Amino acid sequence: MTSPSSGAGRFAPSPSADLHIGNLRTAVLAWLFARSSGRRFLLRVEDLDDRTSREIGERQLADLAAIGVTSDEPVQWQSDHRDRYERVIDQLVEAGMVYECYCSRKDIAQAPRAPHAPQGAYPGTCRDLTEAERDRRRAEIGRPPALRLRTDTFSYTVTDLLHGEYTGLVDDFVIRRGDGVPAYNLVVVIDDAESGIDQVVRGDDLLSSSPRQAYLARLLGYPEPTYAHVPLVLNADGARLAKRDGAVTLAEIGVQRALRRIADSLGYRATDVEGMLAEFDPARLPKQPWIYRPD
Ligand code: GLU
């Protein structure tokens, strides 16, 4: 596991709320996976959405630093790289791989599905419109259209260190949202490739998005990363951990106690990340969600 590698791992929080203990645990795991495989470790703040803020992002980075998770290179903020995403979108448009979509969520929910389209796939409503139909729909909706990728498959298989071969849906997914923001599934692929990231460790709520991302990586000529989708942290009711569950952020729990709880949840004796690294064995990671109850 310790052979040197030119690749990198990463943790990429969205600064819409302070990190909770579950996010911190995922960050520790991403750091452990990277370090134990000789990779660099990078942090990226995914702040394109206007529900995110610089202030929360700075606080997330401070919390990560407090538990020993720091970036080997300057932290990237996605809002500094908008031109990078627009360049790729332009390339895809020029290659005819993209089409405008005028559908609202309701349109999509109510649209008839093509017989071969799986459940959950975009029904293809805007895929084959004529120019005249596009002009009409553009004028009708009175807001900018989204852009969708014209894909040629409904599924793609990725390899995940915890889940094995995972096959999931690839539909004509959005690459630029109607509000003009480049979509998560696009930017994550571009940024990982631009930074030489070849190991993606994150919560298993994102497992189902990995086939779309790996498909797009291949389409853009980028190498596909190795994935490890780690179990989420849930509250006592089995729901996603949230603020209302009590003390869940680092400010509320305290650094030492948070590290101890994370180490306990992974079965480690050490309570700092360097010590956890010595005990880390990816094959022995808990496969079940961690149920977190504040002390
Ligand atoms: N920014 C995403 C989130 O906080 C994670 C993106 C990723 O790891 O691919 O949920």
Image (tube, rainbow, N blue to C red):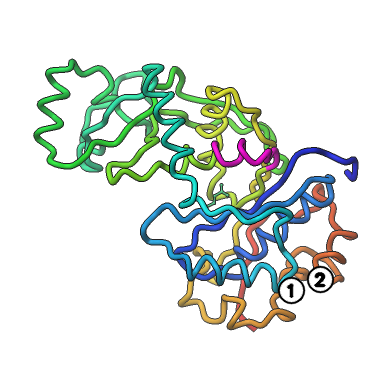
Q: In x, y percent, where is residue 76?
A: 58, 52
Residue at figure coordinates x 84%, y 46% from the top left: 38
Q: Is residue 63 visible?
A: yes
Q: Which of the two residues, 7 or 106, is positioned nearer the viewer here?
A: 7
Q: Secondary structure at mark 2?
A: loop
Amino acid at pointer 1: Leu
Residue receiving disc 2: 272
Q: Looking at the figure, which quarter contains the C terminus?
A: bottom right
Callout 1–callout 2 Cβ contact below 8 Å: yes
The answer to which quarter of the image holds residue 255 is bottom right
For label 2, count other residues whose C-alpha is less than 10 Å away and answer few (under 14), some (14-19) or many (20+).
some
Q: Is residue 38 left or right of residue 66?
A: right
Residue 41, above or below 24: above
Which residue is under mark 1? 259
**Was residue 196 drawn as part of the magenta stretch in this picture?**
yes
- Residue count near mark 1 (Cα–Cα under 10 Å), binned few <14, some 14–19, many ≥20: many
Q: Residue 28 location in percent, x, y?
A: 72, 61
What's the residue at 55%, 37% (across, down)?
A: 189
Whichever of labels 1 and 2 marks the residue nearer the N terminus, that label is 1
**Where residue 269 sits: x, y (%)?**
86, 71
- Read off the magenta span: 190-199
